[in-house]
Amino acid sequence: MNHQNLGHIYLIDDDASIRRALTGTLDKLGFTVSAFEDATIFLKSAIPVSPAVILLDMRMPGKSGIEVQAELLKTGWRPPIIFISGESLPAQIVQAMKQGAADFLLKPFSMEDLLSSITSGMNRDRAEQDLLVRALSVKQRLKSLTPREKAVCAEMISGRSNKEIAQASDSAASTVKLHRARILKKMQVESLGDLIALLKGIALDQTSMN
């Protein structure tokens, strides 16, 4: 048995034979699997972990895959969803993709195609979680800046020089230089390049800067 955990898979499918087959195979490959025969039970009892993907049947008694996807979007829990379906209308496939589905596999699908989709989904979820953790850390550092330092920080990453920042704010270049040094120290970086890299992908809106 492979003890390396490659990530968690939530499997929602009303077909017991498919649940057994996929759970057994994926477990041997190194994934942990939570299998559900009913979408309502999944929505009520599933505990969010990461990295993870959801393997979701489209047509089930009760809630459809599309409805489950829509409910997850409302909760704010958004792991990559891979739809697995025996038969689906084109409109359902389009709706699933519009709602952010990671992939759509029609049964019978090959294990190779499934593993490719799962690997891609895990990588995506891992990257999104890493960005979230980094964003929270950066937000805490931004809170340590004074209002003036926050303004100078925004000017710095926009590419303005000390002289240009000083002229725009009618202050001395030496004062801007001092702010710059304090900003780098509080943001725990060595240079402007490091600061830009740290803030990459993180929107400096009013929420993050306040």
Image (tube, rainbow, N blue to C red):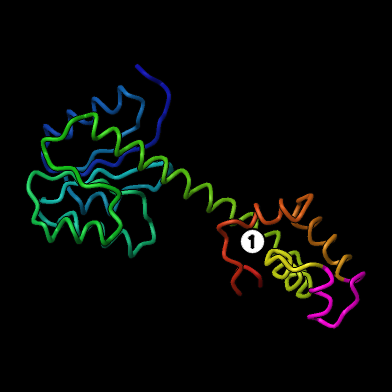
SS at circle 1: helix
Quarter-of-image position of residue 157 = bottom right
Q: Nearer the viewer, residue 159 or 129?
A: 159
- Point 20% across, 51% down: residue: 39
Return the residue nearer the eye: 87 or 169.
169
| Horizontal arrangement in the rendering, residue 34 relative to residue 132 (left or right) | left
Where residue 64 appears, x then y in whole percent? 15, 56
Badge 1 amino acid:
Lys
Q: Residue at x 76, y 51 (%)?
A: 189
Q: Where is residue 131? Give x, y as percent.
A: 53, 51
Neighbourhood count class around disc 1 (C-alpha, 10 Å): few under 14, some 14–19, many 20 upward: some
- Count of numbered circles on the image: 1
Q: In percent of the image, x 30 and y 22: which residue is there? A: 28
Question: What residue occupies the far top of the structure in this picture?
Answer: 1
Q: Which residues are magenta?
A: 162-175
Q: In which image quadrant can residue 100 be found?
A: bottom left
> What secondary structure predominates along the stretch shown in magenta?
helix
